[in-house]
Amino acid sequence: MERFRLPGICYNCRIVFGSGFTAGVGSSITTRGCKSDCPRCGSLAPVPDNALQVIQDGIRLFSGSDFTKQTYENLGLIVEDLRLQKITKAEAISRADQVIPSLGREFREWATLGIAFIALMVTLADFIVSYRAQQHSNRTLEEIVVEAVESAYEAQQPTKKRTLSWDTYLSSPKAKPSDFIPAKSNGLNRKRRRALAAKRKKGS
């Protein structure tokens, strides 16, 4: 029987991982103050307080909508297009409305927290992410989620920085020391600056 693992959130490593708490189809589970070992650093990481029921093909939150595997797959396509900048946020929300109208409404609300939050929901798929802040942290789960996914999103963007190749550098004309004239230097009077400028002009 398929089981779903609840997420653990390590504030040291700033990662979300599958905790040791699982729930099978047809079961309900409530977590309060639970912790699970972080697979990266080994510290005890909190599992968000939540109350949910595992249904046949997804998870039902007692405080939210139903999310099925098909819903996640459809949302995944939307978020992927958004990451690749093929569509705008407005277009993504419109497409979410077409998937499931009620989901579109929640999608719109999530967009106020950042598209990255939706991306994480899709990426984790079988996890259910709580919106509540952890009692022993001054950072909310939303802040960690948005920051983590935005970092991954920015890492995928092509850099606009242009580098000068070695061949180009060797073939480019080199400046002579006399070509560099200090601008309005306190240690250089006007007469000296004019003399340097005339010398530079004469040499060109």
Image (spheres, helix red, strand yellow):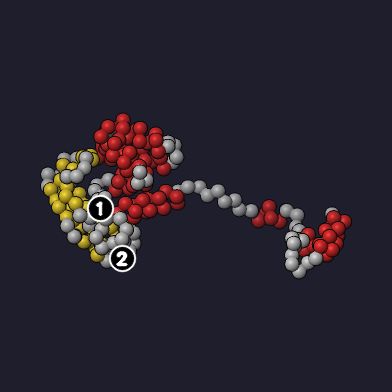
Q: Residue at x 26, y 63 (%)?
A: 136
Kindly give the residue lying farthest to the right in the view shown.
202
Which x, y percent locates residue 51? 16, 50
Mark 2 is on which residue type? Cys
Q: In this view of the protein, can residue 123 be seen by the observer?
A: no
Of the numbered discs in the image, which one, if any, rests on residue 67? none
Mark closest to the chain's N terminus, 2 or 1: 2
Q: Residues within 10 Å of mark 1 (few under 14, many from 20)?
A: few
Q: Residue at x 84, y 60 (%)?
A: 194
Of badges 2 and 1, the one in the foreground is: 1
Q: Is residue 13 left or right of residue 127?
A: right
Which quadrant of the structure image shows residue 71? top left
Q: Position of residue 59 (x, y in %)?
A: 19, 44
Disc 2 element: loop
Distance from label 2 to label 1 (Cα)? 24 Å
What residue lies at 80% left-to-right and 65% top-to-bottom?
189
Q: Which mark is residue 41?
A: 2
Give yes or no for contact between labels 2 and 1 (Cβ–Cβ under 8 Å).
no
Which residue carries the number 1 mark?
132
Relative to the observer, which residue lies in front, 107 or 164?
A: 107
- How far from the left and from the top, in percent, is residue 182? 75, 62
Q: Residue furthest top?
A: 98
Q: Residues within 10 Å of mark 2 (few under 14, many from 20)?
A: few
Q: Would you say 32 lies left or right of 97 here? A: left
Please name whichever residue, 45 or 18, is drawn nearer the observer in this view of the structure. Answer: 45
- Residue extending farthest left: 27
Q: Quadrant of the C terminus?
A: bottom right
- Quick check: 167 above or below 111? below
